[in-house]
Amino acid sequence: MKKNEGYLNDYAALCREADRLEPQLFEKYDVQRGLRDKNGNGVVTGLTNISKIESFQMVDGVKTPCEGKLWYRGYDCIELVKGFRGKHFGFEEVAYLLLFGELPNEKQLTDFRDILSAHRTLPTNFTRDVIMKAPSSDIMNSLTRSVLTLASYDKNCSDTSIENVLRQCIGLISVFPMLSVYGYHAYNHYQNDESMYIHRPSKKLSTAENLLMMLRPDKKYTDLEAEVLDIALVLHMEHGGGNNSTFTTRVVSSSGADTYSVIAAALSSLKGPKHGGANIKVVEMMRDIKANVSDEKDEDEVKDYLKKILNKEAFDRKGLIYGMGHAVYSLSDPRAQVFKGFVKRLAEAKGREKDYALYSMIERLAPEVISEKARIYKGVSANVDFYSGFVYSMLEIPLEMYTPIFAIARIVGWSAHRIEELINMDKIIRPAYKSVMQEREYIPMEDRTIE
């Protein structure tokens, strides 16, 4: 601890004493912690026409868990993937759908791709003066700093007209891959003493192709790699208005803040390990399992170790099997179901069948282990984070880039929700907090005792 920082422990103790609330108070005043009820249902705080999630159905008047479904603008995300798979890359097509509400025809899609390509440029010397100036191993912080700095280059930064906000959003969607990849290369060069690579994006390539090309020293990638990354981006693009970063987008938008501030706030939310950083924890957990299980094919041994993780006896001792369960989904996460088939193909191409078998085993065993320990109201299944980290590792994407890739996809959803908020909502979002504070009489300085 640095000199003069010894006070922190004492001050932290004061904070814990002053700010601790008794758990029974939340029940007494019927406060929904985390804006969720005891069964995990979210408190309705708004309306949206952008996406929908289904995890329950009413059967004979009873709320019953069902296989998860996710719709983008009324289209089943599984059907969307089937529609573009093997024909063209889907990121640009689905981004058009989320932003403008309709699937594009061929000309509309071509024009939109051209617009995104035209916006894949940064201000003069921005990479040198901003991204490379203070490299960080936390690429999300680097990305957030870059977004806020871009505001200084925008003469109409604070204009919240839909036309201007749309221009800003399209610009940020276009440059997010550059800001993320360049931020990683700067860190890798200055802090890891590796070679520096700054590849310019190509107007002929899709978002997924450009991402791989800019990230890799030799610029090379396979068609399968680009296809799987493209599908990952589509599946992470949007997930209802209630997820933490999208809700943050709408809250900050409702205050009248500019686009750059709104997206920076969303990025700060996404980077948390309970949100966008979850896939990193899955990869770290899997490494720990492989290091501590002698036979990865022995289901009993793997199951016993999962129990240790759940009982806070192994891995990070948080008692969580990462990648299992979801705040909304019950029986299944449709994104994970779509992803799994492509994960298998990539594992076979990369010679990672053994790892895939372990993932599949844990996907099957973990719900059993969790249900044995705790009462589950809505079921437990693998979520999209369970497989996405494995995919990124097979794509040789560095761990530091996992959450930024999530952001590269999710900024499309954030943009759509920001625009919807500005068009429809005219009040600042301000939920209420119940004060349980006790009123006290003022005590003069000379009468205050030292404990």
Image: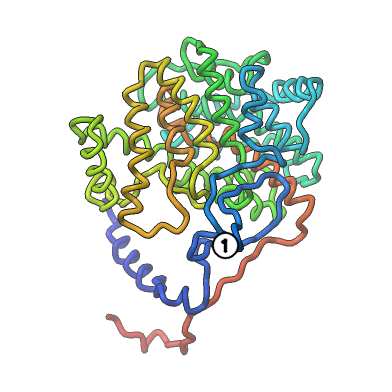
- Image coordinates for residue 242, horizontal then vertical, percent: 60, 52
* Secondary element type, mark 1: strand
Vertical comparison of 70 with 226: above or below: below
Q: Nearer the viewer, residue 326 or 99?
A: 326
- The residue lying at 61 percent from left, 33 percent from top is 78
Q: Which colour scheme is used?
A: rainbow
- Image coordinates for residue 47, horizontal then vertical, percent: 71, 55
Q: Can residue 198 be seen in this view?
A: no
For this orientation, the residue located farthest to the front is 60
Q: Nearer the viewer, residue 428 or 10?
A: 428
- Image coordinates for residue 293, horizontal then vertical, percent: 21, 34
Image quarter hosting the C terminus: bottom left
Identify residue for label 1.
62
Q: In this view, does 67 lie to the left or right of 304?
A: right
Q: Nearer the viewer, residue 357 or 321?
A: 357
Estimate how packed mark 1 is, as few (under 14), some (14 to 19) or many (20 or more) residues with alpha carbons within 10 Å.
few
- The residue lying at 55 percent from left, 15 percent from top is 199
Vertical comparison of 40 with 279: above or below: below
- The residue lying at 52 percent from left, 44 percent from top is 270
- Image coordinates for residue 49, horizontal then vertical, percent: 73, 48
Vertical comparison of 179 with 349: above or below: below
Q: Can residue 368 be seen in this view?
A: yes
Vertical comparison of 206 with 443: above or below: above
Q: Is residue 293 left or right of residue 367?
A: left
- The residue lying at 47 percent from left, 89 percent from top is 441
Which residue type carries mark 1?
Val
